[in-house]
Image (cartoon, rainbow, N blue to C red):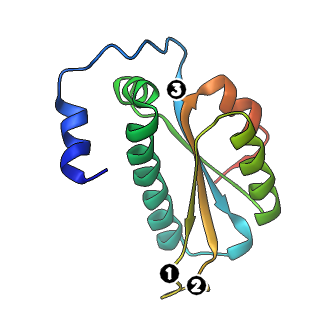
Amino acid sequence: MGLRSFIHRLTAPKLDYGIVTNPVKLILVVNSDLKMGKGKVAAQVGHAAVSATLKSGEYNPTLLDSWLKSGQKKVCVKTNYDEIIQLSTKAQSNNIQVVKITDAGKTQVPSGSLTVVAFGPDEESKLEALTGHLKLL
């Protein structure tokens, strides 16, 4: 989806896709194995949040609309690469949107390194069951 289409979707009159009455949030999981600097982590988390928002607008506008209207709650947590992969597989089997961010390798980490995975936006209860045990960043 192009930028103009995305902006139109956000600003156009809303169609009745249905209503999500439960709280909605976005979970951003940082790969703690990489030992990225604070600025690098911030940039990678930003990439993940934007990518998850765009993807959600294309595939699940109801959840996106609910998330945008409720303040766009985001939580950043951390864990190792192996657990991120396990969580991604579990999320996909539970129909939770997964967005993986890999680095271009121009600064601190090797090219292709998995830096952040975004889960959602989706209902808080589903995401808590998946990532509630992880430590905050």
Whichever of labels 1 and 3 marks the residue nearer the N terminus, that label is 3
Badge 1 element: loop
Residue at (61% x, 68% y) in the render: 115
Disc 2/disc 1 C-alpha distance (Å): 5 Å
Residue contact between numbered discs 2 and 1, judged by CB atoms under 8 Å: yes
What's the amino acid at mark 3? Val
What's the amino acid at mark 1? Ala
Residue 102: x percent and y percent? Answer: 56, 70
Q: Which mark is residue 24?
A: 3
Q: Which mark is residue 104?
A: 1
What's the amino acid at mark 2? Ser
Badge 2 element: loop
Nearest to viewer (mark 3 / mark 2): 2
Badge 3 element: strand
Q: In the picture shown, does residue 39 fall above or below 4?
A: below
Disc 3/disc 2 C-alpha distance (Å): 33 Å
Could you tell whether 85 is left or right of 2 in the image? Answer: right
Nearest to viewer (mark 1 / mark 3): 1
